[in-house]
Amino acid sequence: METSYVKVFSESPIFINRVRTLLEEQNIPSFVKNQIESARLAGFGVLTNTVDLYIYKSDLKKATHIIQDFIKDISS
C-alpha cells in the first residue's frame, strides 16, 4: 500500500521546527516522526539525534524549494 506522504528532511529538532514553520507559512502541512522522544517514553535509547519531517507527496515540488533555501541559509 502506497502512502501519500514522503520524508523530506532529517535533522535536529530545532532545525525541523524551523522548517515546519517555513512550510506552514506557505500552507504546506507537515508532521514529525520523532524516534528520540518515542524511544525515551518507551524506556529505550536511540543512537541518533535526528527527527524526520514528512509532507504530502502533492506538496513535494513546492516544499523542495523552501527546504533547499533553508539548507543554503544554514550552510553559509
Image (cartoon, rainbow, N blue to C red):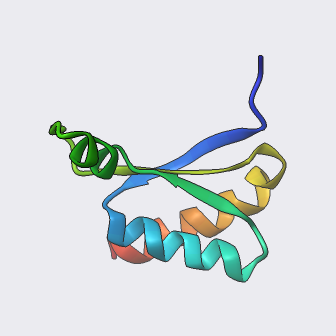
Residue 6 image point, x, y percent: 65, 40
Residue 70: % across, % down? 50, 72
Residue at x 33%, y 76% (from the top left corner) = 76
At 56% from the left and 70% from the top, the residue drawn is 20
49 displayed left or right of 60: left
44 lies left or right of 38? left
Question: Which residue is at the front of the view, 35 or 24?
Answer: 35
Task: Give the vertical position of 41 relative to 63 (above or below).
Answer: above
Say which residue appears at 34% left-offset and 72% top-offset.
14
Q: Quadrant of residue 2?
A: top right
**Quadrant in which residue 27 is drawn:** bottom right
Nearer to us in this view, 40 or 11: 40
Above or below for 11 versus 25: above
Residue furthest out toward the bottom: 25
Q: Is residue 69 above or below residue 32?
A: below
Identify the residue at the far top of this view.
Answer: 1
Name, please, the residue furthest toward the front. Answer: 42
Give me the residue at 66% from left, 57% from top: 64
What is the total number of numbered labels drawn onto the structure image?
0
Query: In the rendering, at what x and y percent does residue 24 appear?
Result: 68, 76
Front-most of 5 and 35?
Answer: 35
Viewport quadrant of the N terminus: top right
